[in-house]
Image (cartoon, rainbow, N blue to C red):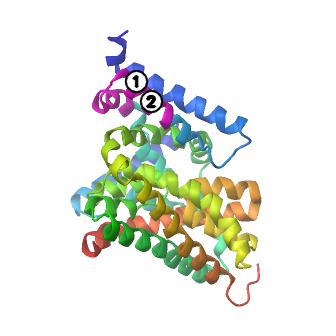
């Protein structure tokens, strides 16, 4: 049994199994935004690692087999972005401004608060990647000397919180038109927000997907050069 | 499979530009921009690429699991700062949401 735990293939299989369980739980919960598949999957896998006392580098020998696909999948984001570009043809200036200001506000507040309250530089830089979809956040976090593992945790937590908070908050300020809700979900809660938008309607979903990919692209281009200079 | 080859080719080009010009932008993002520009130039998404996208998209969370599981190495940070970080995440979302709503809802909007 202990030899089995050293095999890369075992951990690659465990990753796939944890993901499939996470997906089932999410579907059974009626696609509850509190339980995205990745949250449950990672919780199960982390539990298994701690339970068996397996160090992360040993796990990663198997995890690497799956991790290899992350690069191609980031490149793939160009496909939905290209497909959704037409939805913003008529008001692209407003959309770009909303994305730049909205996502800018939330990460500046988060980065500043972390630096002021906790005073940890790598952590402050990492939390600044929170509003972009996980694959991009991880790549940027590596680039700016942040903590890739924490980046992923921040992104998932933000996604869950944003998907829960954005629709009621927008209703409160009477800005709950479909395009506004969709765009805000995409900007503040990336992929988890986009899946929430998909439940609200097609228009919301198109705007959310557009906002998510544009936010990720914008941050990927700007953050690596801006962050070391800011904090 | 040709779709996957397109993705890998763009990724390789991304790495190439990343290394040759020592760009601060991650290689995969450069690859994504190369693919986006190519799609805009061609004017449509090739069938094979659409098929690859349909196959890979639902699996995205799976590909993120190995990195995300790295959270097990961050026990100390979470134990010390976990609650504070959660508060920061919640608080920082509020101005972001309000700014988005304000800009998108300002003035006339025809859709």
Q: Is residue B111 left or right of residue B30?
A: right
Judge whether residue B44 can be spotted in this image: no
Q: Are marks 2 and 1 in contact (CB under 8 Å)?
A: yes
Confirm whether residue A92 shows in the render: yes
Q: Chain of mark 1?
A: A
Q: Nearer the viewer, residue A142 or A150?
A: A150
Q: Assign the N terminus of chain A to one quadrant of the image.
A: top left
Q: Residue furthest top?
A: A1
**Same chain for the residues under marks 2 and 1 in the image:** yes
The residue beneath circle 1 is: A51
Residue at the spot of label 2: A47
At 28% from the left and 32% from the top, the residue drawn is A57
What is the chief secondary structure element of the magenta stretch?
Answer: helix
Q: Is residue B99 left or right of residue A207?
A: left
Q: Position of residue A214 (x, y in %)?
A: 52, 67
| Of residues A90 and A19, the one drawn nearer to the viewer in this rendering | A19
**What percent of the width, then of the height, locates residue B101?**
64, 77
Q: Which residues are magenta?
A: A42-64
Q: Quadrant of residue A26?
A: top right
In the rendered image, the vertical position of residue A1 relative to residue B26, given as above or below: above
Q: Chain of mark 2?
A: A
Q: CA distance from mark 2 to mark 1?
A: 6 Å
Give yes or no for residue A43 being in the magenta stretch.
yes
Give the number of callouts. Answer: 2
Question: Where does the image place residue A105, in percent across and percent down from the top left?
Answer: 47, 76
Q: Is residue B82 magenta?
A: no
């Amino acid at each position: 049994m202990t030899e089995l735990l050293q095999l890369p293939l075992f951990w690659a299989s465990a990753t796939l199994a944890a993901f499939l369980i996470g997906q089932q739980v999410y579907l059974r919960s009626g696609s509850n935004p509190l339980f995205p598949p990745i949250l449950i999957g990672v919780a199960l896998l982390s539990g298994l690692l701690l339970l068996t006392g397996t160090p992360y580098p040993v796990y990663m020998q198997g995890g690497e087999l799956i991790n290899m696909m992350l690069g191609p999948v980031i490149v793939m984001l160009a496909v939905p972005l290209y497909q959704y570009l037409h939805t913003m043809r008529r008001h692209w200036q407003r959309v770009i401004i909303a994305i730049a200001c909205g996502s800018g506000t939330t990460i500046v507040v988060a980065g500043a608060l972390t630096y002021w309250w906790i005073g940890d530089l790598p952590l402050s830089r990492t939390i600044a990647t929170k509003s972009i979809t996980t694959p991009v956040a991880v790549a940027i976090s590596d680039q700016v000397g942040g903590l890739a593992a924490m980046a992923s945790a921040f992104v998932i937590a933000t996604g869950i919180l944003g998907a829960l908070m954005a629709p009621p908050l927008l209703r409160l300020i009477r800005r709950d038109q479909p395009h506004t809700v969709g765009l805000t979900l995409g900007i503040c809660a990336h992929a988890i927000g986009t899946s929430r938008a998909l439940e609200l309607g097609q228009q919301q979903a198109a705007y959310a997907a557009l906002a998510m990919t544009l936010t990720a692209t914008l941050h990927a281009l700007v953050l690596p050069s801006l962050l070391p200079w800011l904090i | 499979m040709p779709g996957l080859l397109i993705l890998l080719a763009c990724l390789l080009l991304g790495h190439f530009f990343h290394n040759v010009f020592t760009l601060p932008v991650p290689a995969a993002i450069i690859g994504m921009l190369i693919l986006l520009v190519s799609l805009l130039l061609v004017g449509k998404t090739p069938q094979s690429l659409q098929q690859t996208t349909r196959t890979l998209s639902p699996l995205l969370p799976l590909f993120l699991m190995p990195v995300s599981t790295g959270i097990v190495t961050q026990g100390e940070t979470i134990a010390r700062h976990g609650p504070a970080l959660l508060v920061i995440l919640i608080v920082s979302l509020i101005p972001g949401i309000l700014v988005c709503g304000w800009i998108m809802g300002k003035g006339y909007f025809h859709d």
